[in-house]
Amino acid sequence: MNWYPDAIRKPLTADKDRQALTVHNRVNLHIAVSESESLYSFFNQRGIADSHFYVRRDGKVEQYVSTSMRAYADLEGNDATISIETQGFGGGTWTVEQRESLARIYAWAVRTHDVARKLATDSKVGDSSKGLSWHRLGIDGNFPALPSIRAGRLQRGGGMHYSTSTGKACPGDDRIPQIPMIFERAMDILNGSTTITEENSFMADLTEKQQTEIYQDTTEKVYDAATDQWDTQAEAQRKTNVLLRRVLANQVADQAAPTVDVDADAVAEALLTKLTPAVAQGVADALAARLAD
Ligand SMILES: [Zn+2]
């Protein structure tokens, strides 16, 4: 039996002749089209399709079915899908809390069931339907064509039906574009990132001096590929100015040198009204060099 540790555990007891789930190819995201705090009593009836998880707007998670057993939210995908229903109607987006919980459940599914670390791109049997997935990938309807992420089963060249309905919006036009964000967040979690709150408390454990040093190390250095060194912001800015000055100066000098007899000081003086002193001086220097050639 597999239960997500951060879920409120509410095992369904209704007899639904449930089979084992032994292959975990994908996590499918859904919208419940309900504002209910829980789908437990609705799901706990014979003959009603159900999902493994439900994520409320506030991010709280309920789990109804062990992920070692099949749920019924994804029709032809039921034999290899972990399903997550979410609180909300067809329109609208997932809250920050819902996205965080969805990322965590998917990351847990990757660790626990070795679900592929990738976004599914359709519902076809095989690799392309594995990973983090969503209901519309297996729903027929008049959806936008590829490369829109809102494309449905038909626009993506067929595959398994995850629903018998046509045109069902699940998980919704404005939520589907949030899925790549959820995926990225899950990858961060799998790579060891903790929550923002935990990061804050980690920082709070350090002295002010340590915090300042970390801040400076991570924000104030700029990599210079030419010298293979990390420069301070000020040094990087100075180098950039020198470079800009050289480029500008050479452009002006190229245009001016062949045609006119230039008084470099006068040019510098004139340029000062339009350019910074450093750039104006650079132009004058470059001109003087060209004229001396
Ligand atoms: Zn759905």
Image: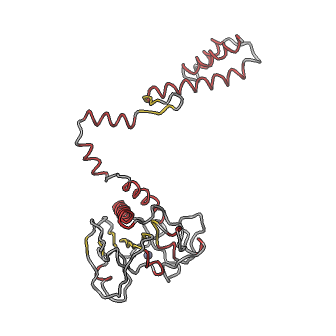
The answer to whether residue 129 is left or right of residue 23 is right
Ligand 1 resides in the quarter of the picture at bottom left
For residue 233, side relative to residue 149 (left or right): left
**Residue 160 position in % (x across, y down):** 53, 78
Q: In the rendering, at what x and y percent does residue 123 appear?
A: 52, 73
Using the image, determine if residue 164 lies above or below residue 235. Answer: below
Residue at image point 71% right, 22% down: 254
Q: Please tell me whether residue 215 is drawn above or below residue 34 in the rendered image.
A: above
Q: Nearer the viewer, residue 75 or 270?
A: 75
Q: In which quarter of the view is residue 222 placed?
A: top left
191 up-or-down from 21: above or below: above
Depth check, front residue: 103 or 130: 130
Closer to the camera, 127 or 10? 127
Image quarter for residue 246? top right
Residue 175 seen from this side: no
Give the color scheme: rainbow, by chain, secondary structure or one colour.
secondary structure
Q: Residue at x 31, y 72 (%)?
A: 2
Considering every residue shown, the one lying at the far right of the view is 259
Q: Is residue 70 above or below residue 100?
A: below
Total number of numbered discs in the rendering? 0
Residue at horizontal 56 percent and vertical 69 percent from the top:
151
Q: Quadrant of the C terminus?
A: top right
Question: Is 80 on the left or on the right of 194, as rendered?
Answer: right
**Residue 1 seen by the camera:** yes
Tell me what residue is drawn at x 58 percent, y 75 percent. Answer: 158
Residue nearer the viewer, 185 or 107: 107
Is the N terminus in the top left, top right, bottom left or bottom right quadrant?
bottom left
User: Residue 193 at what x, y percent from top left?
Assistant: 35, 51
Q: Position of residue 277 (x, y in %)?
A: 54, 19
